[in-house]
Image (cartoon, rainbow, N blue to C red):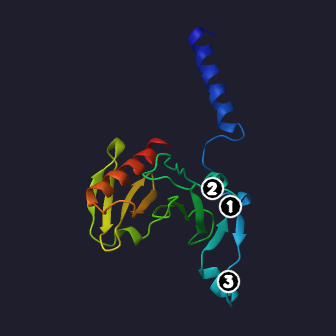
C-alpha cells in the first residue's frame, strides 16, 4: 500500500474509535431516560389522563440532564451578572412519549436575586414562540433570531432554531434600568455563546 492508502486507513480507524469511545460528545438518538428519574404525575388522574400528559423527568445534575438530551445544548458561561449555576427546572417527553419530542428548561438567578436567565430548548414544532410582536436579530453564522420584549415586566426573549432544535432565552435584570437595546445586546451575546459551543 502507498502512503496515501496508509493515511486514509489510519484516519478511518481513528474516526471509528473516537465515535465509539465511551463518554463521547455525540447526543443520543432519543432521550436517554436511564440517566434521569421519572417524576410521577400528581393528582387524582386516571390511566387515560396520564397517557395524554407528557412524561416529566428530573436529573441529579445539570450536566447529566444535558447528556441525556437527543440534541446538544451548550450553556453560556459569561453572564451579564454574578449568577448561581444553571439548574434544570424541567425535562418533558411530549407527544408519543418515545424520547423524540423533548423539552428542557434551565434557569439561573443573580446572586443578588435581582434577575434571572431562563433557557428553553425543544426538538418539535410548537406555536409558543410565534406569539407577540417580534424583531429580527442576526446571530453568528448568519442565524436569524426573533427578539420579543415585555416592557411592562422589563423582560425580553430571543428565539432561534438550528438543525430542527428550537431555542429561547428569557432575560430579566432589575440591577440596571430597563433598556431594549441593552436587552438585545445581552441576549445576542448569550445566544452566540450557545451557538459557538454547538
Return the mark for residue 42.
Answer: 3
For the point 39% across and 60% down, the residue is 175
How packed mark 3 is, by other alpha carbons closer than 10 Å (few <14, some 14-19, many 20 or more), is few
Q: Disc 1 to disc 3, how far (Cα)?
A: 18 Å
Q: Position of residue 98 (x, y in %)?
A: 63, 66
- Residue bearing mark 1: 59
How packed mark 2 is, by other alpha carbons closer than 10 Å (few <14, some 14-19, many 20 or more), is some
- Residue bearing mark 2: 62
For the point 62% across and 14% down, the residue is 6
Q: Are marks 1 and 3 in contact (CB under 8 Å)?
A: no
Q: Earlier in the sequence, mark 1 or mark 3?
A: 3
Q: Disc 1 to disc 2, how far (Cα)?
A: 7 Å
Q: Secondary structure at mark 1?
A: loop
Q: Residue furthest top?
A: 2
Q: Is residue 70 left or right of residue 179?
A: right
Q: Position of residue 67 (x, y in %)?
A: 64, 51
Q: Position of residue 154 (x, y in %)?
A: 34, 68
Q: Position of residue 161 (x, y in %)?
A: 40, 56
Q: Disc 3 to disc 2, how far (Cα)?
A: 24 Å
Numbered-mark total: 3
User: Can residue 24 be seen in this snapshot?
Assistant: yes
Q: Quadrant of residue 176?
A: bottom left
User: Can residue 127 be seen in this snapshot?
Assistant: no
Q: Quadrant of residue 166?
A: bottom left
Residue 69 versus residue 196: which sits nearer the camera? 196
Q: Secondary structure at mark 3?
A: loop
Q: Earlier in the sequence, mark 3 or mark 2?
A: 3
Residue 138 versus residue 161: which sits nearer the camera? 138
Q: Are marks 3 and 2 in contact (CB under 8 Å)?
A: no
For the point 59% across and 16% down, the residue is 7
Q: Are marks 1 and 2 in contact (CB under 8 Å)?
A: yes
Amino acid at each position: 500500500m502507498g502512503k496515501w492508502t496508509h493515511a486514509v486507513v489510519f484516519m478511518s480507524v481513528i474516526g471509528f474509535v473516537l465515535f465509539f469511545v465511551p463518554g463521547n460528545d455525540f447526543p443520543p438518538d432519543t432521550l436517554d431516560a436511564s440517566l434521569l428519574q421519572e417524576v410521577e404525575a400528581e393528582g387524582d388522574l386516571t390511566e387515560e389522563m396520564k397517557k395524554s400528559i407528557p412524561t416529566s423527568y428530573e436529573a441529579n445534575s445539570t450536566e447529566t440532564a444535558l447528556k441525556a438530551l437527543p440534541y446538544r445544548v451548550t450553556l453560556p458561561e459569561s453572564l451579564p451578572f454574578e449568577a448561581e449555576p444553571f439548574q434544570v427546572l424541567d425535562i418533558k417527553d411530549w407527544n408519543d412519549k418515545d424520547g423524540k419530542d423533548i423539552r428542557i428548561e434551565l434557569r439561573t438567578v443573580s446572586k443578588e436575586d435581582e434577575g434571572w436567565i431562563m433557557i428553553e430548548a425543544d426538538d418539535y414544532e410548537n406555536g409558543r414562540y410565534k406569539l407577540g410582536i417580534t424583531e429580527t436579530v442576526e446571530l453568528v453564522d448568519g442565524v436569524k433570531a426573533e427578539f420579543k420584549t415585555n416592557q411592562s415586566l422589563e423582560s425580553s426573549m430571543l428565539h432561534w432554531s438550528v438543525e430542527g432544535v428550537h431555542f429561547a432565552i428569557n432575560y430579566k435584570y432589575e440591577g440596571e434600568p430597563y433598556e431594549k437595546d441593552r436587552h438585545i445586546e445581552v441576549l445576542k451575546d448569550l445566544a452566540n455563546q450557545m451557538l459557538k459551543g454547538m
